[in-house]
Image: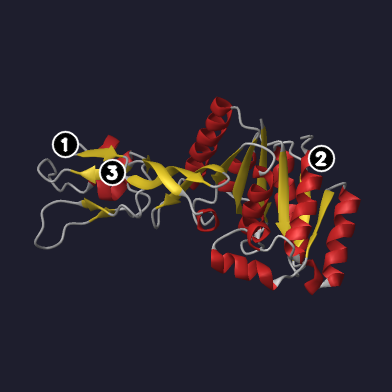
Amino acid sequence: MKQVVILSGKGGTGKTSLTAALAHLAHAGMNLVLADADVDAANLDLLLDPEKLEEHDFTGGFKAVIHGEACTACGRCFEVCRFGAVIEPKPSGKTYGVDESRCEGCNTCIYQCPEKAISNYRPVAGKWFRSSTPYGTLFHAEMNAGEENSGKLVSIVRKEAAEACVSTGCDLVLVDGPPGVGCPVIASCSGVDAAVITTEPGISSIHDLVRVAETLALFHVKPAVCINKSDINPKRRNEIVEFCSGEGITFLGDIPFDENVMKALSMRVPVTAAFPESPAASAVADIWNRLRTLIEYP
C-alpha cells in the first residue's frame, strides 16, 4: 500500500481538482481509497459525486458546564477562568454560565468550584463519512462552524482510509490535503510515501513552497512539485523550476491554463474524465505517469 498526499502552500492553487483528476487516472489501473483531509473546507466530494454509506459524529475538546441547581454564585469560576469563558449572572439570574465559544476545556473551574457544581463534556464538533465514488471509497469529514481540533479529525479520516485500504488489499491511498502548514497539514503528511505540492506562478509561490517543503522535511517526506496555470507567468514559472532544481526537489510538470478545467468543475467531474484530450488533462496524465515512477508503482 502506498500513500500520497496532495498539498499546497495556500488555498486556490487547484489542489482538489488535481486530486480528483489523479483519482480518475489511477482508478484505471489500480484499486484506490481516497481521503479528503481538508476538513475545514472539504470539497473533493463535489467532484466525485459520492454516495454516503456511513456517518459518524466527531467530538472535539472538552467544554465546561455549570449546573445551576448546585451553583451558589460564589464567583470562584469567574475569577480563575483565563479565557473569559465564564459568564456572570444577569441581574435577574442567580448562577454563572459558560460561553462555549471561549471555553478551552482546561478544567480549572471544575477543580476550583467549592460546590462541585461544574462538570465537562465533549460536544459534537463535526462528522466524518465513508462514501462510495466511481473511483473508490472516499473518507471525508466536515467541521462544524467555529470548532477546532481539525488536526484530530484529519487523523481519524486518514486512519480509517488506511485501514480500509489494508482490509481490501488496495494499492493506493490518495489524500487531498489541506493548504498551509498548520496542524491539519501535519496530520495529513505523516507517514506518507510521497507528497505533491501544487503551486501557481505567483508572487508568493516560492515562499509558500518553502514553508510546505520544510514541514515535509520534519517527517522525512520528499516533496514533488507541479505548477498549475504555469503559462500565465513564464518568468515566475521558471523561477519555481530553478528553485526546485537547486533544492533537489522533483519537478513533476506543468499544467497550462485551460478553460476546460472550469467547464469540468461546473459539470462536477474531473477534467481528465470530461475532456480527456484537453491540454490540462494531457498534462495531468503526464504528471500521473511521473508520480507512479516516483512511488515505484509498476
How crowded pointer 3 is (Cα within 10 Å; few <14, some 14-19, many 20+) is rated as many
**Disc 3 vs disc 1: which is toward the camera?**
3
Amino acid under disc 1: Glu
Amino acid under disc 3: Ala
Q: At x 87% / y 49%, what residue is drawn?
A: 247
Horizontal and vertical percent position of residue 1: 66, 30
Q: For mark 3, what is the residue?
A: 64
Q: Counting residues from the N terminus, which is met first, the one under dot 3 or under dot 1?
A: 3
How crowded pointer 2 is (Cα within 10 Å; few <14, some 14-19, many 20+) is rated as few
Q: For mark 1, what is the residue?
A: 115
Q: Is residue 140 visible?
A: yes
Near-viewer residue (119 or 244): 244
Amino acid under disc 2: Thr
Q: Counting residues from the N terminus, which is met first, the one under dot 1 or under dot 2?
A: 1
With 232 as the anchor, is 83 left or right in this view?
A: left
Q: How many marks?
A: 3
The local secondary structure at tag 1 comes to: loop
Horizontal and vertical percent position of residue 23: 64, 48
With 288 as the anchor, is 188 left or right in this view?
A: left
Is 155 situated above or below 228? above
Residue 293's disc is: 2
Q: Is residue 200 visible?
A: no
How crowded pointer 1 is (Cα within 10 Å; few <14, some 14-19, many 20+) is rated as few
- Disc 3 to disc 1, C-alpha distance: 15 Å
Q: Are marks 1 and 2 in contact (CB under 8 Å)?
A: no
**Disc 1 vs disc 2: which is toward the camera?**
2
Q: Counting residues from the N terminus, which is met first, the one under dot 2 or under dot 3?
A: 3
Q: At x 58% / y 59%, what residue is drawn?
A: 269
Near-viewer residue (70 or 1): 1
Q: At x 79% / y 34%, what residue is drawn?
A: 296
**Disc 2 vs disc 3: which is toward the camera?**
2
